Image: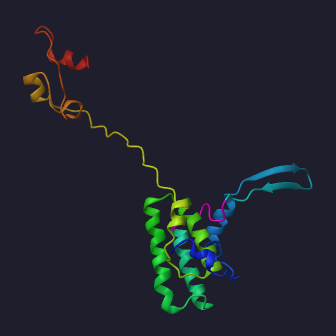
Amino acid sequence: MDPRSILTMKANTKKTVHITQFLSENSKQRKNNKRNEFVLHSSERETIVFKTEDEHPYLGIQMEEWGAANMRVLNHLLMVNDIERSELEFYLAYTTRIFEFAESFEWNSVLNYDYHYRELQAEHGFKWGTYSPHMELQMLVPKRPKPSVPVQNPAPKEDCRIFKAKGACPFGDKCRYKHVKALPSNNSRQDATKNQ
């Protein structure tokens, strides 16, 4: 879909159906409990509490919650004839694309994309699953690479034969055996291991 085509399409007043309307009660309760609360005034008879809304209506929805609510949305759209049975594959393609986005992009940015896509779809009536590269470029944030944690090998039990024979090992620090340096002949091997 060419982003400019939205400019030529006539907008309608169809109400957007959002994921938040179809979350389970447990999900809604968990999401509401995450809101920040500030006590402004407290007395014996009353307490005034200020609750902040999330920055985004979808913020905090987990992937499995979104998936379940999305299927409820699909069922609702079929029941109220907002989507034809012949267009079911398009909605499923859109759902698949959201899960594919979740593999490569931050989940909160995928939720933001979904929110705005639903808004535009309701306003302009394009088919579900219509490709929107402009929205993807603007809204989707790539996942940050996870910091790599160096794998520590367990303490080696045997001496490295290569190091013992040649005084050096081609595996260096990655060698799975102990590198014991040769000491003057008066010292025992046990002293060598204590010095490491």
User: Picture quarter containing residue 15?
Assistant: bottom right
The overriding secondary structure of the stretch rendered in magenta is loop
Q: In the rendered image, is residue 131 in sight? A: yes
Query: Looking at this view, is 134 or 163 the one in front?
Result: 134
Indicate whether 105 appears above or below 7: above
How many numbered discs? 0
**Residue lying farthest top?**
186
**Residue lying farthest left?**
165
Image x and y of residue 24, in percent: 61, 74
Q: Which residue is at 25% across, 18% downward? A: 194
Q: Is residue 69 toward the left or the right of residue 97 in the image?
A: right
Q: Indicate yes or no whether the magenta region holds residue 118.
A: no
Q: Which residue is at 23% across, 35% downward? A: 174
Indicate whether 72 appears above or below 39: below
Indicate whether 13 appears above or below 56: below
Q: Which residue is at 65% across, 68% downward? A: 28
Query: Looking at this view, is 6 or 148 the one in front?
Result: 6
Q: Is residue 185 toward the left or the right of residue 157 in the image?
A: left
Query: Looking at the rendering, in which quadrant would you find the C terminus?
Result: top left
Q: In the rendered image, is residue 62 in sight? A: no
| Residue span colored magenta | 56-63
Q: Is residue 40 toward the left or the right of residue 94 in the image?
A: right
